[in-house]
Amino acid sequence: MKRHFSSRELFVLRNHIPIDTLIETHLMLPSKFSEGYFRFLCPLCNEFQTATKAKTNLARCFRCERNFNTIDMVIICKGLRFVEGVNYLKTILNNCG
Ligand SMILES: [Zn+2]
């Protein structure tokens, strides 16, 4: 398993996999649309006080006051370490390509 990643590789993984798709299709967190925002069940507090932002490709929990990028989401939801989380996202990206 590859253990070192370039900043370019990490940038692509954070930005080229839509956070909504990651949450809904791959991590399969409960999610819904409300008031024009994609909302997901926060994996930390289990509340729907969340939204995603396509422009930054970040997910936010207003209750936890935290932003999550794609790598953060995978690490938290799958209980993976950083390297494993990055490799998980690389697999998704390769399958989308
Ligand atoms: Zn939360």
Image (tube, rainbow, N blue to C red):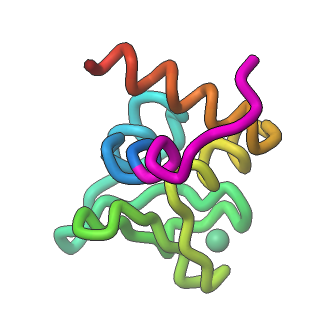
Residue drawn at x 56%, y 64% is 68
Percent from the top left, x then y, of residue 9?
Answer: 48, 41
Whether residue 8 appears in magenta in the rendering, the answer is: yes
From this view, report whether residue 3 is shown above or below residue 52.
Answer: above
Percent from the top left, x then y, of residue 13?
Answer: 45, 43
Q: Say which of 66 and 28 sits in front.
A: 66
Q: Say which of 52 and 8 sits in front.
A: 8
* Residue 23 seen in the figure: no
Left or right: where does residue 32 sit relative to residue 26? left
Indicate the quadrant where residue 12 lies: top left
Whether residue 92 appears in magenta in the rendering, the answer is: no
Percent from the top left, x then y, of residue 82?
Answer: 75, 44
Left or right: where does residue 70 sit relative to residue 82? left
Quarter of the picture containing the N terminus is: top right
Quarter of image, ligand 1: bottom right
Q: Say which of 97 and 46 sits in front.
A: 97
Left or right: where does residue 10 sit relative to residue 95? right
From this view, report whether residue 39 is shown above or below residue 76.
Answer: below
Count the labels in the image.
0
Quarter of the picture containing the C terminus is: top left
Residue drawn at x 60%, y 26% is 88
From this view, report whether residue 26 is shown above or below residue 11.
Answer: above
Residue drawn at x 55%, y 56% is 41
- Residue range in magenta is 1-11
Q: Say which of 82 and 61 sits in front.
A: 82
Residue furthest left in the image? 36
Residue drawn at x 42%, y 65% is 58
* Residue 1 seen in the figure: yes
Percent from the top left, x then y, of residue 6?
Answer: 56, 45
